Amino acid sequence: MNLDWEKLSSSYGEDLILFRSRFDQMRHPVSDEVFKRLVLESVDWVNMVAIDTQGRSIMVRQYRFGVGYSTLETPGGMVDPGEDSLTAAKRELAEETGYSGGNWQYLGAVEPNPAIHNHLCHHWLATDVVRTQAQDQGAGEAIVVETLTENQVRQAVQSGELRHVLALSVLARVFRLWDVPMTGLFQG
């Protein structure tokens, strides 16, 4: 069965600072009914697991307006026009935490929410980073840097203190965050 919807038209709505709203008129592939669908357009994002020379993960804590409280997460941000994801990841790490240098490895990308977002979040691993400068936060940022051991990261995840999905996604590419609850579940 063909699941691809036909786009009939698009129109733009309000610019939402981090996103631009787009409304697509889409034809259902089976019923031919037309639906209005929202897409939030954005540039690509980056986030990273940054590990210092002592083996600690460089983490950030900041207030998140959507949930209304401060969250613990990995450093990250938006890819600026003309940047590739590695350049953006290095810039975001330095700006948010003051750490830089080290060895960088691309871990792949995820779709933050393909139901309504059109972009990717690129994951990076940086090892042997060092603090080389003061934080360079934007006018709308208030970020505290924390360094956690792998075990402390795992505890923060298992306790529910760390539950930002993009942070969990990149961390899971580097650390074993959870024990598998049931083994042999899908044995034939």
Image (spheres, rainbow, N blue to C red):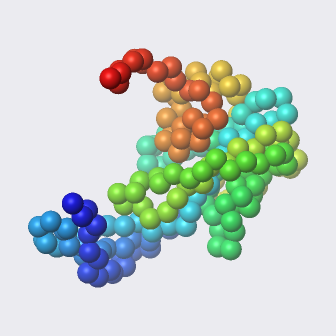
Residue 139 in the image: above or below residue 16: above
Q: Quick one: quadrant of the N terminus?
A: bottom left
Residue 116 in the image: above or below residue 65: below
Q: Is residue 97 visible?
A: no
Image quadrant in which you'd find residue 31 = bottom left
Question: How many numbered marks appear?
Answer: 0
Residue placed farthest to the front in the image?
A: 188
Residue 27 coordinates in the image, percent (x, y):
20, 73
Give the camera-side residue of 5 and 188.
188
Seen at 45% across and 68% down, the residue is 41
**Residue 4 horizontal side relative to residue 60, left or right:** left
Residue 178 coordinates in the image, percent (x, y):
52, 23
Seen at 49% across and 41% down, the residue is 165
Give the camera-side residue of 64 and 12.
12
Seen at 71% across and 58% down, the residue is 86
Q: Quick one: quadrant of the C terminus?
A: top left
Residue 132 coordinates in the image, percent (x, y):
88, 47
Give the camera-side residue of 113 and 58.
113
**Residue 34 horizontal side relative to residue 134, left or right:** left
**Residue 155 horizontal side relative to residue 68, left or right:** right
Seen at 68% across and 25% down, the residue is 150
Residue placed farthest to the right in the image?
A: 132
